[in-house]
Image (cartoon, coloured by chain):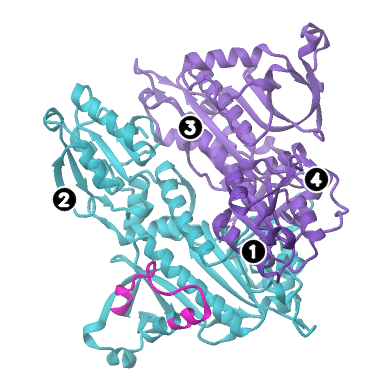
Chain colours: A cyan, B purple
């Protein structure tokens, strides 16, 4: 994309309403604009990141055997009355009355709808287990939305729901999603740590929050260094019951807690060389809730012995739009965003430091023709300083800097945003490094 | 995907509530389920088609130089009061009051939001023209939703908005979108015809509906045979003003009208050999509306002479979820859906006619391993007849039929759904044909 013709409205000043780094940088780099309190429009640069994150989440859900559906945003109140949650949910639920005076709502979550779809469609134990997921916009009418997309009212979430014949099966589904999440977050360049969370309505230890490490995070976290070392994407764990058990044992044998649940006595037993502290942000939550909804809504399947059984369910959430902010909290500096390669809106920016100089223009156009959609070409009539500042602000992993002196010598300067490292080399060598 | 473990609830009986072919087939083949009146959940098979259609729309918008954004579903009533449409819109608009008693609405369209984003972000003629698009769920509270996803309340639409300095520029943007639409529909296997539509608020001839031909379509259409012959994807037209003018002249020189606007006197002048009649379904609408919103909402940019100018706008819609139904209306038979290759949920179905037969199982597994995500493997314990019927119903372009006699001889039967043609050949030869 040519920056001169793009819809990327960067800002020089820091917007007064933004209290945290990601909110400030998302506004300044032109990723989003607020359209109402806690509701955002995603502009081209931000939307590319959102879609990259969504793609990684989707690929890992598919790899784990989950099937994608899409439930609507507007739900009927009837189903929520069946589950008993319509009155419980309170003011965070956006309630709507349609033209026929029917009570509707903008879904804050989808346990009721998925259970209804399941009971209409699945009749036999032979069809289980199943994990269904969707990536859909949700609405929670927060009383005081803040922190940009980190705590907005309209937000994009991946939520998955598992259905199993018994608790043992539900445990396998739970561990499947846990492994999928570790791979998902690693692919985004994040260090994620699963932490035991409030166990919810049915007790037990099958409830985990996923905290990613970020120096500006909202909570203090204490964890075992072991979490930092494991390469989940290339790990030997596969999605079978045996591997998943070994994986889960390894996960739960290492200490990890936020300050709310920090247990000093246990912490003291951790080898001091392995103790790590930091700040973290919650980006996912998985939990098993058994037959809560299948019983309330009478969803059953026939077991091998002919009896009717209420399947065991779990739910598994990832905050997709929240992750855009969380990644920035985890990866930025004073000059701007530093995108991990896997989710960057553009792989590289081409900076033409002297528009109108024949050698600069020709070299930039040739680079742009080769990089295509992977590059943002800064062809604006701006000073070099403004171009450097905007490229750092937007956080492209690579900058290819084309100035008149270098161009005359047949060279460009290649800068790696994350390290600041700059080297001079011919354009083709620069392209080879980027690829 | 293995059909035995998939969430594809097919139905043998025809659902009573479905009046048209696409609605019946979408329910019977397990593509969607209604969750409230006019509101649907997309199940795995249907969602794959929806995403394929969305992908083609997106690729052609990008190829035409439009930039993708995403505006939220929930909008503030304030902007609609600014444009004057809040009171005009009537009961089709889903109006919502949030917990702070602010008037909100579920967007039925996005002229106000995009104009607001534009006026906050773009200041100079140097940044124009711009075409921004998004693919987002919308809501129109139809009094009597019907025909399945063809006339639902919550529906997915691609809407684009162009901003130009003057009318001449707006004409180029308009023609750009018209060419993009011809390519988009052709890639989905559809014959689309642009027809002059009501010119709307500002008159002129820049308003066209796109009608696709389908034997069960809602309107009678009259058109010149010339529309059937042109290969838009490989046509010589490019996105420059000169090509676009030639393209637009060709488009508008041929007769095309629905019965509402049919002009018998003009029709009589068309060479009888070139006269075509049929049924059609509207799937897109493009129109130029000038400065209606930029004036009402005071969006200006600075021209080269320093004056403030209200940009000229146009809007360009494609009914993405409606297209799933429209494609089925255009392409089905008594046995079920016939998917065009480009949007099929799976390229091929593998039909194992005798589960438990070692040769059949081995051959099917080998085919499935090679086709991967492109195949739906019918590994259910069902009779051959049920498998044939379901494969025809779901409409996969190819069926690879593996029976014990053929397998023993090292052969499969390959069936092309569109023609019914069946040939016996070795598995590798079948894979080569499909690829």
Q: Secondary structure at mark 4?
A: loop
Residue B105 x %, y %? 62, 47
The residue identified by callout 1 is: B2
Of badges 2 and 1, nearer the viewer stands: 1
Q: Separation of disc 3 and disc 1 at Cα?
A: 36 Å
Residue B357 x %, y %? 70, 69
Sequence-wise first label, 3 or 4? 3
Q: Chain of mark 1?
A: B
Q: Separation of disc 3 and disc 4 at Cα?
A: 34 Å
Q: Separation of disc 2 and disc 1 at Cα?
A: 49 Å
Pick the residue in front: B407 or A403.
B407
How crowded pointer 3 is (Cα within 10 Å; few <14, some 14-19, many 20+) is rated as: few
Q: Residue at x 78, y 55 (%)?
A: B388
Of badges 2 and 4, nearer the viewer stands: 2
Q: Quadrant of residue A259?
A: bottom left
Sequence-wise first label, 1 or 4? 1
Q: Residue at x 33, y 52 (%)?
A: A24
Residue B232 x %, y %? 58, 25
Of badges 1 and 4, nearer the viewer stands: 1
The residue identified by callout 4 is: B146
Q: Secondary structure at mark 2?
A: loop
Q: Which residues are magenta?
A: A224-246
Q: Secondary structure at mark 1?
A: loop
Q: Secondary structure at mark 3?
A: helix
Q: Chain of mark 2?
A: A
Q: Does the magenta segment cover residue A74?
A: no
Q: Are marks 2 and 3 in contact (CB under 8 Å)?
A: no
Sequence-wise first label, 3 or 1? 1
The residue identified by callout 2 is: A421
């Amino acid at each position: 994309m040519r920056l001169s013709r793009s819809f990327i409205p960067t800002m020089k000043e820091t917007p007064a309403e933004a209290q945290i780094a990601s909110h400030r940088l998302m506004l300044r780099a032109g990723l989003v604009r607020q359209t109402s309190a806690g509701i955002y429009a995603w502009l081209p640069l931000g939307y590319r990141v959102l879609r990259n994150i969504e793609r990684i989440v989707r690929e890992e859900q598919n790899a784990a055997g989950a099937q994608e559906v899409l439930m609507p945003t507007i739900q009927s109140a009837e189903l929520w009355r069946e589950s008993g949650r319509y009155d419980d949910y309170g003011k965070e639920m956006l309630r709507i009355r349609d033209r026929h005076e029917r009570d509707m709502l903008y879904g804050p979550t989808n346990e009721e709808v998925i259970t209804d779809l399941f009971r209409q469609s699945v009749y036999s134990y032979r069809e289980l287990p199943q994990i269904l997921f969707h990536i859909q916009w949700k609405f929670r009418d927060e009383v005081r939305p803040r922190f940009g997309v980190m705590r907005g009212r309209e937000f994009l979430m991946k939520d998955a729901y598992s259905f199993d014949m018994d608790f043992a099966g539900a445990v396998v589904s739970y561990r499947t999603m846990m492994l999928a999440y570790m791979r998902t977050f690693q692919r985004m360049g994040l260090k994620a740590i699963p932490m035991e969370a409030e166990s919810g309505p049915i007790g037990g230890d099958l409830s985990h929050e996923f905290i990613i490490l970020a120096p500006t995070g909202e909570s203090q976290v204490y964890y075992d260094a072991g979490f930092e070392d494991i390469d989940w994407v290339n790990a030997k764990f596969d999605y079978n019951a045996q591997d998943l058990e070994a994986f889960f044992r390894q996960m739960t044998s290492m200490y990890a807690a936020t300050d709310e649940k920090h247990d000093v006595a246990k912490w003291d037993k951790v080898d001091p060389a392995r103790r790590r502290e930091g700040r973290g942000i919650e980006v996912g939550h998985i939990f098993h809730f058994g037959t809560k909804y299948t019983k309330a809504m009478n969803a059953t399947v026939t077991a091998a012995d002919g009896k009717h059984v209420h399947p065991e369910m779990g739910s598994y959430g990832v905050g997709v739009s929240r992750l855009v902010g969380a990644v920035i909290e985890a990866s930025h500096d004073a000059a701007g965003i530093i995108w991990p390669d896997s989710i960057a809106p553009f792989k590289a920016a081409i900076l033409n430091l002297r528009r109108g100089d024949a050698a600069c223009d020709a070299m930039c156009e040739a680079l742009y023709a080769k990089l295509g959609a992977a590059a943002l070409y800064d062809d604006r009539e701006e000073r070099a300083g403004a171009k450097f500042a905007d490229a750092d602000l937007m956080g492209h992993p690579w900058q290819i800097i084309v100035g008149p002196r270098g161009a005359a010598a047949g060279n460009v300067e290649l800068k790696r945003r994350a390290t600041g490292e700059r080297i001079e080399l011919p354009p083709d060598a620069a392209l080879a490094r980027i690829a």
